[in-house]
Amino acid sequence: MLLTRLLAFGAADILQTIQDYVTQYKDIAIGFLGSQNIWIQAAILVGLALFAIIGLFVFIKKFFKLFIVLGILGAVGWYLYTQTDIITNLLDGITGAIPIFLLTL
């Protein structure tokens, strides 16, 4: 119980620090946008939206291969888990070879 309270207060302190840090830059950005013409504000917001959309697609492209590899490894692991004879024979072969190797030393 005490540990969860300490973690909760620690998380609140960390979140407050992050919020204070981001608030400074948010105020600067709002002040900059407020002093500009409406067309410049729209152009900046469209640019930010395009930047976010392109970033999302780059993120998907980069991690798509990772998701495929993890899926293949998961399928292979599931197949080996369901086919217990393969794992048993593999372990028997390894443990059977160790004493023979040690006797030859």
Image (cartoon, rainbow, N blue to C red):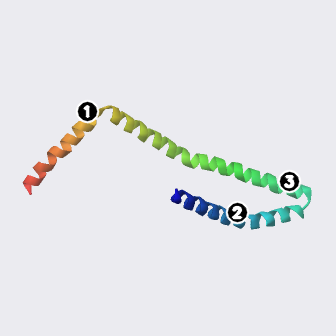
Q: Residue 44: x, y in percent?
A: 81, 57
Which circle marks residue 19 in the picture? 2
Q: Amino acid at mark 3?
A: Ala
Q: Residue 49: x, y in percent?
A: 76, 51
Which circle marks residue 42 in the picture? 3
Quarter of the image for residue 33 reads: bottom right
The residue where tag 1 is placed is 85
Q: Quick one: label 2, few (<14), some, or many (20+) residues within 10 Å?
A: few
Q: Residue 21: x, y in percent?
A: 70, 67
Q: Residue, x 27% and y 35% (percent of image)?
A: 86
Q: Residue 101: x, y in percent?
A: 12, 52
Estimate the spatial distance between the alpha carbons at disc 2 and disc 1, rounded to whole Å: 55 Å
Q: Quick one: label 3, few (<14), some, or many (20+) residues within 10 Å?
A: few
Image check: 100 left or right of 75? left
Q: Quick one: label 1, few (<14), some, or many (20+) residues within 10 Å?
A: few
Q: Amino acid at mark 2?
A: Gln
Estimate the spatial distance between the alpha carbons at disc 1 and disc 3, rounded to whole Å: 65 Å
Q: Are marks 2 and 1 in contact (CB under 8 Å)?
A: no
Secondary structure at badge 1 equals: helix
